[in-house]
Image (cartoon, rainbow, N blue to C red):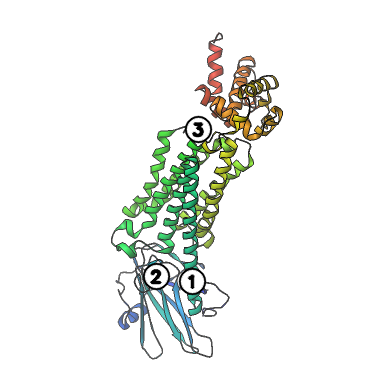
Amino acid sequence: MEGCLWKPEAFYGQNISQEVEFLAIGKENPPKSCDSQSIQKLKQMVWVPNESSDSLRGRQKSREQWLHFRLQNQLEVPSEFSVLIQWINIPSAEMCSENRNGEIGDVYSGYKWESWLGLLSPFPHFNVRLDKGESRDFYLFLDSNETINFPIRTISTSSYRFIVLFRFLTFLFFLMVGIVSVGWATSEYIKSKEKVYLSILLHYLFFFLLVYSVHGKELASVFGNENNLIRHSYYLFLSMNHFIFFLYLFSFVKFINENLEYPALFWIFALSGFLYLLVPIFPEVYEYRIFIVLLIFGSAAYFLKNTHLFIINSGNKEEKRYFFSWAFFLFLVFLKTLFHFDFYPYQPFFIYAAVFYLPFLTASSFLFLRNYEKRDGSKTRFRTITNKINTIEFRSKLETYLETEKIYLNENCNEEMIANQLGLTYHQLSELINVEYNFNFPSLLNLYRIKEAKRLLLEEPEMNVAEVGRKAGFGSRSAFYLEFKKQSGINPNQFRKSTSNHPNK
């Protein structure tokens, strides 16, 4: 096979997945181990080619699977290399072959053959030696806990050592990020008493455990391979991560002094992540796993938007970027989950993008929240600015400015603009509003906007409701409806209808 041997320029060696064949299911039971008799039996059986060029890809009918491939040494000297399986959730793997002299080579790999300091499980790999010009058939017996969807490669000893070092350094990097995050989040919480910092820390740590259990060290190698939830620990950690994501959403809502719109529904969908556990417990559910994935990620996306709607509509670019950074992370996790649920072949970007994106998201979230505290001004550690101004005087000026100039009718109206008009700083105005009105600047504007909208609904009955919202200063119809119902308990159409039936109302 041309080019099947290790190439120095390839980080993970030569991918030979496309050359592999799967043992076809037949009436005759396949062998259970590698030996001379098994090889002779396997030669007579039917093999099906692997159709994916990126990875081994085949739905398992049982945990045990036979694979076949042929390797050829085209060099003029003997060649030594390794056959590497790029996955760790494989309790045992055995490879055997028969050389030119009829001698059987049998090599075993599994959970216990290399310790890696006990921190990481290695990729199973098998050492091979081919004489010059030799071509040999290899038979690989896998006991895999997951549907087969991972590459198989040929790789040199030096490259394998580099992979060992790279994985270990990557593990140390994420561990150090975790340690820094613990210190950072704890410090911010002590100073601010805001639980959102701790929820983001918890989100990072549990996602780290999720990735570690799949790509670092599987639970089955520690607790045994008999329990379904241990053997498929990804589902367990995925369920926990979904719930912790909702804990972050809840703490963020409290951080910005808002309330959940549908609290009961929120917590029901927070627990919906545990539907993942049905997949390993009830094998028949596997065929319907896409509906579970769509339900869980659909609810996560909905409540991410719902709980961040305030900052989406704020007009502040930094706040919008914060929302979209979390939305992008959720999308990357969705892609990763689709891979692990076997909806497309092995693609490194889809698998690892969310992993390497998370440390940057965590750090930027801490920075954003701290800056938000400063802008808000009502938070404990920054609430000192209004002591330097006459709050009664500036409140009167602010209300006169809003009522006479009606600056709130401009959807681009922002806090900086009004602060400049009043001769205050951004932070002084922000704290003034929070102290005097007990809510934030956008809520104050919306209070006036809804008041103006009600006037238009009564005095301009022919005007379209969407146009009423636009003239009242709202940037979108959905934002207008949401705020109107929040303040009035009914939507604009219902308000107009009720007032038309009761003209004296």
* Residue to which mark 2 is pinned: 117
Query: Which element type, helix, strand or loop, lies under badge 2?
Result: helix
Q: Is residue 468 left or right of residue 73?
A: right
Instruction: Give coordinates of residue 400: x percent, y percent.
Output: 67, 20
Q: Earlier in the sequence, mark 1 or mark 2?
A: 2
Can residue 23 be seen here?
no
Front residue of 270 and 128: 270
- Disc 1 crowd rating (10 Å Cα; few below 14, some 14-19, many 20+) is few
Query: Which element type, helix, strand or loop, lies under badge 3?
Result: loop
For the point 59% across and 26% down, the residue is 444
Q: Earlier in the sequence, mark 3 or mark 2?
A: 2
Please say if 61 is above or below 71: above
For the point 51% across and 78% down, the residue is 4
Which circle marks residue 258 in the picture? 3
Image quadrant for the C terminus?
A: top right
Please say if 21 is above or below 251: below
Q: Are marks 1 and 3 in contact (CB under 8 Å)?
A: no
- Disc 3 crowd rating (10 Å Cα; few below 14, some 14-19, many 20+) is some
Question: Label 1 sits on what residue type?
Answer: Leu
Q: CA distance from mark 3 to mark 2?
A: 48 Å
* Residue to which mark 1 is pinned: 165
Question: Label 3 sits on what residue type?
Answer: Glu
Which circle marks residue 344 in the picture? none
